[in-house]
Image (spheres, rainbow, N blue to C red):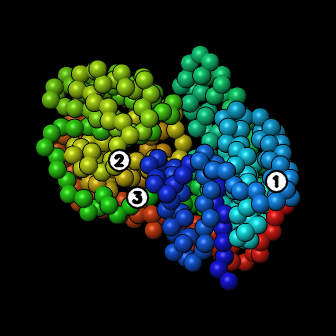
């Protein structure tokens, strides 16, 4: 009998654009490759589920109350926004119809949905969210700082409970693995599943004719907004002073007004909601990851390196990739050194094939192999059950 897993995540991943959705899409594909049926449910885009019976409606209402109570106990505003009645209906319908062996929850904020399932729960963390919020609180000002501090404490409460109860926990770096264990997760249940990259970049020809510097990110996320502003205000003037012909491309989905305004600065262009970042990376002389608050492993760094594009990143931006420094990756938090590294890569570009080879072992099929296998083993050894 083919094992089935119900996968619950934030956003639709069938046409993945964000880093998180790309990761989820590749996890689903790796599980499919192992003969596991994956039923994906995106809370952020879950449509109405047909309620065939009054009994199903009452079950859904009870399920909603259970998940609601779980979110209330956490006390996090940023988490509770993922409570969706339509998603709960979809999860319960999938459990009833497909009799899954396990529930796979993508992102810590989705853990309260475990209240719907009696069987083993797998948590893929993406980031240690409370650390990300703590990092942001240390660099934010005014009400943003106090809100981030509060959210960090509440999300830490959620993650501590989640990693202790989950049958398996996926993390993206050794640093995150240590934090998960510190939260109480048994080391034997924590699996390193680093972010990777597709094969596309390795085979895309480079066409660098101009000194173009790029920053690819979700531009509606506060840490990325702050990163773009820091890059434009603290680093970019130094680059332009030394190389007036240089251009900075800021590329990503849903840019905020703060990011859009950066296009008025000298040599800066903002490209919103592009269909693919590949054409932009293939023309870039240098890519950047200037995050001042972050967690996890930055998927966009690995993607840029797979295109043969050298990367300059802050220490938080490159967290989890420190061992790759010197292989087309330069890490610094000093604006002056950051600018000098960009200029160096433009003046003396590294061999593109060597840069690509540095991350050849970070294709998704490699980075997710152990995690997908462990999830498959778990699913194959359990029968379905609901609460």
Mark 2: few/some/many CA within 10 Å (<14, 14-19, 20+): few
Q: Which residue is drawn at 28% across and 20% down?
A: 265
Q: Which image quarter holds the C terminus?
A: bottom right
Which label was assigned to residue 197? 3
Residue 197 falls in which quadrant of the image?
bottom left
Earlier sequence position, callout 1 versus callout 3: 1
Q: Is residue 53 above or below residue 321?
A: below
The residue sitting at the top extreme is 142
* Residue 289 in sight here: no
The residue sitting at the bottom extreme is 1
Q: 51 or 308: which is nearer to us?
A: 51
Which label was assigned to residue 275? 2
Q: Which image quarter holds the N terminus?
A: bottom right
* Residue 144 in sight here: yes
Earlier sequence position, callout 2 versus callout 1: 1
**Horizontal and vertical percent for residue 385?**
81, 68
Q: 17 or 191: which is nearer to us?
A: 17
Q: Is residue 225 above or below residue 37?
A: above
Q: 348 or 268: which is nearer to us?
A: 268
Q: How far apart are marks 2 and 1 (CA)?
A: 39 Å
Q: Residue at x 57, y 60 (%)?
A: 192
In the image: residue 109, left or right of residue 26: right
In the image: residue 250, left or right of residue 167: left
Q: Helix, strand, or loop for circle 2?
A: loop
Earlier sequence position, callout 2 versus callout 3: 3
**Horizontal and vertical percent for residue 200?**
32, 61
Which one is closest to the eye, mark 1 or mark 3? 1
Q: Residue at x 35, y 43 (%)?
A: 274
- Report the residue marked by disc 1: 57
Q: Helix, strand, or loop for circle 3?
A: loop
């Amino acid at each position: 009998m083919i094992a089935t897993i119900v996968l619950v995540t934030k956003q639709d991943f069938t046409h993945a654009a964000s880093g998180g959705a790309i990761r989820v899409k590749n996890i689903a594909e790796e599980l499919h490759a192992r003969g596991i049926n994956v039923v994906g449910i995106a809370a952020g885009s879950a449509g109405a589920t047909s309620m065939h019976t009054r009994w199903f409606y009452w079950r859904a209402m009870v399920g909603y109350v259970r998940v609601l109570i779980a979110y209330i106990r956490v006390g996090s505003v940023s988490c509770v926004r993922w409570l969706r009645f339509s998603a709960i209906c979809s999860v319960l319908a999938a459990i009833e119809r497909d009799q899954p062996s396990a529930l796979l929850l993508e992102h810590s904020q989705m853990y309260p949905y475990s209240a719907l399932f009696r069987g083993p729960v797998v948590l893929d963390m993406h980031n240690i969210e409370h650390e990300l919020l703590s990092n942001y609180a240390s660099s934010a000002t005014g009400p943003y700082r106090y809100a981030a501090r509060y959210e960090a404490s509440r999300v830490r409460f959620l993650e501590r409970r989640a990693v202790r109860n989950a049958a398996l926990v996926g993390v993206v770096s050794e640093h995150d693995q240590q934090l998960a264990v510190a939260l109480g997760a048994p080391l034997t249940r924590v699996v390193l599943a680093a972010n990777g990259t597709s094969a596309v970049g390795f085979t895309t020809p480079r066409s660098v004719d101009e000194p173009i510097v790029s920053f690819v990110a979700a531009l509606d996320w506060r840490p990325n907004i702050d990163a773009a502003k820091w890059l434009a205000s603290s680093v970019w003037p130094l680059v332009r002073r030394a190389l007036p012909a240089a251009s900075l491309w800021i590329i990503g989905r849903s840019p905020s007004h703060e990011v859009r305004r950066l296009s008025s600065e000298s040599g800066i262009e903002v490209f919103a909601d592009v269909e693919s970042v590949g054409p932009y990376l293939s023309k870039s002389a240098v890519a950047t990851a200037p995050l001042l608050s972050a967690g996890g492993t930055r998927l966009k760094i690995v993607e840029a390196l797979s295109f043969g594009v050298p990367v300059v990143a802050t220490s938080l931006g490159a967290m989890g990739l420190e061992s790759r420094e010197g292989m087309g990756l330069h890490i610094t938090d000093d604006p002056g050194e950051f600018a000098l590294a960009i200029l160096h890569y433009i003046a003396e570009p590294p061999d593109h094939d060597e840069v690509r080879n540095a991350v050849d072992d970070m294709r998704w099929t490699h980075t997710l192999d152990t995690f997908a296998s462990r999830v498959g083993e778990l699913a194959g050894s359990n029968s379905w059950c609901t609460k």
